[in-house]
Image: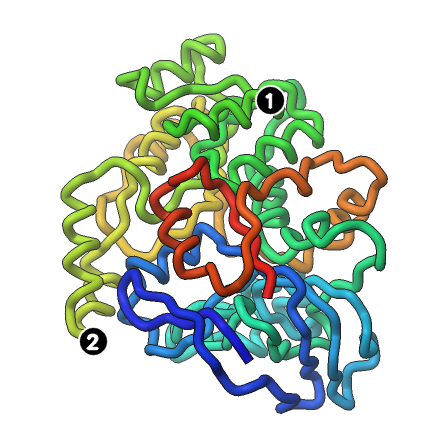
């Protein structure tokens, strides 16, 4: 079958790979009908090379039709339409029973000191072949896949795999008080859905922060006030001026690794990803590769006693944290990999409504065949052609 495979820094290719097969009784094989490029896939494209092996199949946002099921999969049948959460969870361990599906103890990667395995996301998270492919083996299919109605287009449901529950969890963690304000840092796909989710959940004052004009305009059309980073010198001061001098009650940081900001850290990233494997991994994990400009600005911006919710993905430790400010301002921090299955029942009900209330069908700016994925990685990375979200069809 065809799949999108990693071969080096900024080098992904369509290749023929072995067809997936049932390996465990709880497996299923899904024929992919739609898959997407996620912002965190760009970390694999340009940063996390030390944790990848040439030929690794990428992609963790996908949906499709069940083609085979293992003997222990009683909840699915051949022909079912499903969307698959990006984290692989068993559904019955200690963590899963508490809704902490991203920390599943059955698929947890203990040797790496990491949580549940993820589709298509490096040796840190199990080196499980991903979903930018014609077919995928889905472990723990007796719990993970979400059965979908037969009607409505794929894009009503595709984002249930990752970015919609990630945005939803980010808003939940932000704990915006009644009548309060929420600033969303980063208006990529997760940030846009966070703006829409917050508005849907009744947050009247949402402020989007970014520097890409079309992303700012899209957030405005979703009901947000906006701050253009190219037009202000002090974001925190601007946000205080917009919120009665205090700052937003909550800030959702949807930027993460490779944020615009620290040029020294940018050079560190460029160097670290090109070092020999063991040295590079140590540099990433201990010496640091992240640019924390967005997170530091979020901490500076939120009001005293407020909450910072971190949805952006981080991979190292480049800058010291402003612990004095965190403590003095009494800021609450909530963060972490999304517990996708915790939110999918609620979100499926919203996505299945006759009206597309979250604008899911209109989020993607580019729809292309899987064969064009290598070029679209570059276009997405460089934000060319107003690219916000890419959906691929195998």
Which residue is denoted by mark 2 in the rendering? Answer: 278
Picture coordinates of residue 211, whole percent (x, y): 37, 27
Q: Mark 1 points at which residue?
A: 221
Q: Can residue 114 be seen in this view?
A: no
Q: Which of marks 2 and 1 is in front?
A: 1
Looking at the picture, how far across and down is residue 95, in whole percent? 61, 67
Determine whether the residue tagged by mark 1 lies in a helix, strand or loop: helix
Residue at 20 percent of width and 76 percent of height: 278
Residue 195 against residue 373 in the figure, above or below: above
Please give the name of the residue rendered at 31% of the width and 21% of the height, measured from the top-left corner. 230
Residue 102: quarter of image: bottom right
In the picture, the quarter occupied by the N terminus is bottom right
Residue 246 image position (x, y, % from top left): 44, 14
Q: From the viewer's perspective, is residue 196 above or below residue 224?
A: below
Q: In the rendered structure, which disc, 2 or 1, sits on the residue that comes first in sequence?
A: 1
Does residue 144 appear to the left or right of 368 in the view shown? right
Write the residue at 63% across / 60% down.
34
Q: Residue at x 46, y 69 (%)?
A: 4
Q: Where is residue 184 in the image (x, y as percent from the top left)?
A: 49, 31
Q: How many marks?
A: 2
Q: Tell me the tag on residue 289.
A: none
Classify residue 138 by image quadrant.
Answer: bottom right
Q: Are marks 2 and 1 in contact (CB under 8 Å)?
A: no
Q: Distance between the residues labelled 2 and 1?
A: 47 Å
State which quarter of the image contains the C terminus.
Answer: bottom right
Mark 1 Cα shell of 10 Å, populated few (<14), some (14-19), many (≥20): few
Say which element carries label 2. Answer: helix
């Amino acid at each position: 079958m065809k799949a999108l495979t990693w071969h080096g820094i900024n080098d992904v290719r369509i290749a023929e790979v072995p067809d997936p097969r049932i390996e465990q009784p709880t497996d299923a094989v899904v024929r992919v009908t739609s898959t997407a490029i996620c912002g965190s896939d760009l970390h694999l494209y340009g940063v996390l090379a030390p944790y990848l092996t040439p030929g690794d199949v990428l992609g963790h946002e996908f949906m499709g039709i069940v083609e085979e099921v293992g003997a222990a999969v009683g909840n699915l049948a051949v022909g079912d339409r499903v969307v698959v959460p990006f984290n692989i969870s068993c559904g019955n361990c200690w963590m899963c029973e508490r809704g902490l599906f991203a920390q599943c103890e059955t698929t947890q990667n203990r040797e790496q000191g990491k949580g549940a395995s993820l589709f298509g996301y490096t040796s840190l998270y199990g080196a499980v072949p991903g979903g930018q492919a014609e077919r995928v083996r889905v472990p723990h299919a007796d719990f993970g896949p979400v059965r979908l109605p037969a009607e409505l287009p794929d894009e009503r449901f595709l984002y249930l795999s990752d970015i919609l529950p990630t945005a939803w969890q980010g808003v939940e963690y932000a704990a915006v008080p009644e009548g309060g304000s929420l600033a969303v840092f980063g208006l990529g796909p997760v940030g846009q859905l966070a703006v829409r989710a917050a508005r849907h959940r009744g947050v009247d004052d949402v402020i989007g922060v970014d520097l890409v004009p079309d992303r700012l305009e899209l957030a405005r059309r979703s009901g947000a006030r906006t701050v253009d980073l190219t037009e202000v010198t002090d974001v925190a001061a601007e946000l205080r001026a917009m919120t009665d001098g205090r700052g937003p009650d909550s800030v959702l940081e949807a930027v993460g690794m490779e944020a615009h900001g620290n040029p020294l850290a940018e050079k560190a990233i460029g160097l670290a990803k090109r070092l020999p494997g063991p040295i590079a991994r140590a540099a990433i994990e201990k010496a640091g590769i992240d640019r924390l400009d967005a997170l530091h600005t979020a901490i500076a911006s939120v009001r005293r006693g407020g909450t910072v919710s971190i949805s952006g993905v981080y991979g190292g430790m480049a800058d010291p944290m402003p612990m004095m400010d965190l403590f003095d301002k009494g800021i609450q921090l909530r963060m972490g990999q999304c517990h996708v299955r915790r939110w999918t029942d609620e979100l499926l009900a919203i996505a299945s409504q006759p009206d597309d209330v979250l604008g899911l069908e209109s989020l993607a700016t580019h729809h292309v065949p899987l064969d064009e994925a290598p070029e679209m990685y570059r276009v997405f990375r460089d934000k060319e052609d107003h690219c916000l979200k890419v959906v691929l069809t195998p």
